[in-house]
Image (cartoon, grey):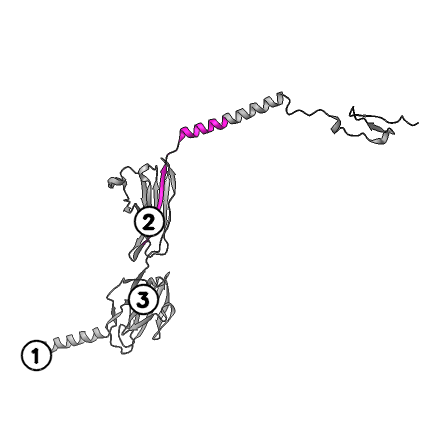
Amino acid sequence: MAKTRLACLLTLLSTHCYFSVLAVVLKTSEESPSTDEFNRVELSCLIESISTINPRIEWKKITNNKPSYVYFDRRISGDLENRAVIREPATLVITNATRSDTAKYRCEVTAADDNKSFDEIVIDLVVRVKPVVPKCSVPKSVPFGKLAELSCVEEEGFPKSQYQWFKNSEEIPEDPKSSPKFLNSSYTLNTGTGTLRFTSVIKEDAGEYYCRAKNDAGHAQCAPQKMEVYDIDIVGIVLGVLVVVIVLLCITVGICCAYKQGYFSGQKQTGNNYKVPAKGDGVDYVRTEDEGDFRHKSSFVI
């Protein structure tokens, strides 16, 4: 009786093992791998069980929900041609990853001789890109009590860069009240957009400013730029305006007096500027030396 039970148990075990082998099963060691740009990265696709000797293996890149082949019919193609290899049995190795490789990848294995003849896994790859030197804008001089805005932009890094601002080589905190050195300053700092906005600058806000863009791949920063804060001389401005008004008033009075004195009236005609009348009346004129005017030379001829 015991032998019969043992035989049945062995039969069940062998049957279970037999059916477990007749199914293709995939797994991966890393579902969301990441790497820096130009580095090597592996997209592991491990066949845990299979009975088919030569299964069909395919890799597809999914961009905007549209799949495209990167490995088909035992050949690398598409974006990864000449930059990737297959490590047996199905792992995809990218030897020189670029930012355009960031996407989802699907490993598909078809085993014709297995009862469960198809399985797939999806791997989400992120290629990190180090930020480049950001473009920084710092006003050179700002009037005391006025608004000032400093900007910092970097668009190459991936994931998207976060920003830090520094004044005289010291990091500016997001909350000015959290640091005694910035306690009197009134500003808002947006680490996502890189904007540092002073609502009302004070003398203590003057200094050298620079911005740093950073992400998981690294960081880069712009050169320091100096911002000065100056006072507006209200008294000087008022005195300057008064001086201009007084000068204009004096000029106006002088012109009026000159008109009254006749300096701008027409001059009297003299002998030197007397014009000779036209000779259409038949009269000849002779100029005398002592009188400086013209006299008749002859009478009218009738």
Where residue 241 sits: x, y (%)?
A: 47, 28
Q: What residue did someone put label 3 on?
A: 106
**From mark 3 to mark 2, how far is it between C-alphas?**
40 Å
- Give the amino acid type for the residue marked by disc 2 in the picture: Cys
Q: What residue did someone put label 2 on?
A: 211
Residue occupying the far left of the picture? 2
Whether residue 242 appears in magenta in the rendering, the answer is yes
Task: Decide: is 32 above or below 285.
Answer: below
- Give the amino acid type for the residue marked by disc 1 in the picture: Lys
SS for callout 3 = strand
Residue 235 visible in the shown view: yes
Residue 1 visible in the shown view: no
**From mark 3 to mark 1, how far is it between C-alphas?**
49 Å
Where residue 283 sits: x, y (%)?
A: 86, 28
Say which quarter of the image contains residue 67: bottom left
Q: What residue did someone put label 1 on?
A: 3
Residue extent of the magenta highlight: 220-245
In-image side of 248 versus 84 (left or right): right
Disc 3 versus disc 2: nearer the observer: 2
SS for callout 1 = helix
Whether residue 239 appears in magenta in the rendering, the answer is yes
**From mark 2 to mark 1, how far is it between C-alphas?**
81 Å
SS for callout 2 = strand
Quadrant into which the N terminus falls: bottom left
Say which quarter of the image contains residue 109: bottom left
